[in-house]
Image (spheres, rainbow, N blue to C red):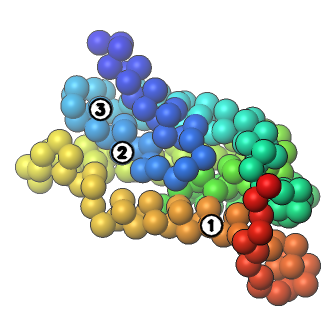
Amino acid sequence: MWWQYLFVFLGALLVDITPIPLPPAFIIMIFFQMLYGLSIWPVIIIGVAGSIIGRYILMTYIPNVSGRIFNQSKNDDIRFLGDKLKNNFWKSQFFILLYTLMPLPSTPLFIAGGIARMKPLQMIPAFFAGKFTSDSIAVLMGKYASENTGGGLLSGVFTWQSVLGLLTGLALLFAVVFIDWRSMLVEKKFRLGFHIWK
């Protein structure tokens, strides 16, 4: 039924639209694929589409949110970090692709890109390539595990790896928000700044 695929789309969209690192969208894809016995490739394609739209929306609204909660100095600092990504298109595309191929949450990457006012076309193509590849592998592995290990519906979803991924996402978000990036990239000095709120 088509509405079952709509759950895949909406689930992926919702976890990738939020500025808080949540479990990755591929967990939603695996869950609904197993729950309803959905065809694997439509699940992957629809789930990745939901993720991309979610990240696009995150990029468009996060500058307004950051302007209301962070002081001007912190917003300028994160924009400086984003400008470093913007300055070399191919290097930034390679970095984004490599980042999304690794099992790291992409929320901090899109928060930084959004606050820096990077254009979606500067991030989405590489994100799509990495996301489609990594989510395809994850969903195919999830399907294989569910069919061959005899585990339940949530078997393999809430594991130490998923908890580690969530904690890594929170650590990366902490880094984006609290590291003084101008000091790090210009002066080569590591500084933390906690007076960032309006």
Q: Give the spatial CA distance, label 2 vs label 3.
A: 9 Å
Which residue is label 2 attached to? 27
Quarter-of-image position of residue 140? top left
Please determine whether, in this image, residue 86 is positioned above or below residue 50: below
Q: Give the spatial CA distance, label 3 vs label 1.
A: 31 Å
Identified at 53% across, 63% down, the residue is 170
Please determine whether, in this image, residue 101 is positioned above or below residue 132: below
Which residue is label 3 attached to? 32
Identified at 52% across, 32% down, the residue is 13
Which residue is label 1 attached to? 174
Residue 7, how many percent across, how many down?
Answer: 38, 24
Quarter-of-image position of residue 158? bottom left
Residue 198, how many percent across, how many down?
Answer: 79, 55
Residue 143, how many percent across, how many down?
Answer: 25, 43
**Which label sits in the foreground, 3 or 1?**
1
Identified at 66% across, 69% down, the residue is 175
- Of callouts 2 and 3, the N-terminal one: 2
Q: Rate crowding at label 2 as few (under 14), some (14 to 19) or many (20 or more) other CA atoms within 10 Å.
A: many
